[in-house]
Amino acid sequence: MSIGLPGALDHTIVAHLAPVIESLGFRGLWLNDTPDGDALAGLEVAAIGTSTLKLGTGVIPLDRRGPNEIVGAMRGLPQERLSIGVGSGSARHPLGVVARGVRELTERSEASIVVGALGPRMRRMGAEAAGGVLFNWLTPAAAADATAELRRDARGRDVRAVLYVRTAMTEDARGALHAEADRYSSYPAYAANFERIGATAKDTTIDGSVPGELAARVAEYAPHVDEVVLRAITTEQTLGAHLEFLEKVAA
């Protein structure tokens, strides 16, 4: 189990949280990459105060940041601990863009290259060419199906199945969790995903403010994927809010 944080989180907060995440025994820290949040710069800060914590980006849109830029930005990172998540963004030819990006990044780095994939064609490409696939917005049953397809398409290759799960741990964060679910439901690609798996966006989240809900849901997900990333949803992007999230998850 790993922790996911916003890529736009202040780097002083990331620097404080990373060793806490490591000391609590979590596998890794993942930061999403956004126009206002450089995931690789955030991970460089996280790497300084940690020694075993795995570091990942989920995901860098290749139409916004190409392989050359990514390779340059990851030079200061411990690549033996690093997973670079990449996706198509708004590219007109998404499969080709991601396939070329995966190939170039694999050739030019020692990091594990992971493909962010909603649909079956992108997942198949990731199974055949990448070191892993990053799943998003799936129920436990859908995660089981997606991972089974990944193993089949990998044809014996060692490919990791990583799953992001949006998670709130306090009652006041429940509204933010639902707002996040509603926002993604409005995007056509994600709406198609929810229709395909026969679930709503809220069905794929964890409301840890309900007693026992976190443990029960993680137990449902864990048998089907190699790594569950609890993507922290908090009402405020402060050190205190994220420390509270970590404390409640660890408990």
Image (spheres, rainbow, N blue to C red):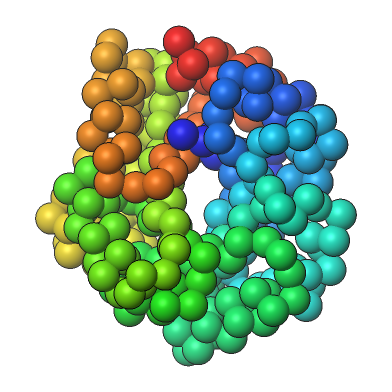
| Residue 237 can be seen, yes or no | yes
Does 93 sit left or right of 61 as displayed? Answer: left
Query: Residue 212's spot in the image, x, y percent?
Result: 27, 14
Q: Nearer the viewer, residue 23 or 95?
A: 23
| 143 in relation to 238, above or below | below
> Which x, y percent locates residue 146?
26, 60
The quarter of the displayed image where residue 171 is located: top left
Image: 76 above or below 131 = above
Image position, residue 67 (x, y; %): 71, 76
- Residue at (80% x, 46% y) in the render: 44
Quarter residue 118 falls in: bottom left
Q: How many marks?
A: 0
Determine whether 49 is above or below 33 in the image: above
Q: Report x, y in % for residue 249.
A: 46, 19
Q: Residue at x 69, y 79 (%)?
A: 107
- Where is 35 relative to 226, above or below? below
In the image shown, does 177 or 251 lie closer to the viewer? Answer: 251
Taking the spot 45% from the left edge, 84% from the top edge, the residue there is: 95
Q: From this viewpoint, is residue 91 visible?
A: no
Nearer to us in this view, 218 or 209: 218
Q: Residue furthest left?
A: 198
Quadrant occupied by the C terminus: top left
Q: Residue at x 23, y 34 (%)?
A: 220
Along the horizontal axis of the image, is 117 left or right of 31? Answer: left
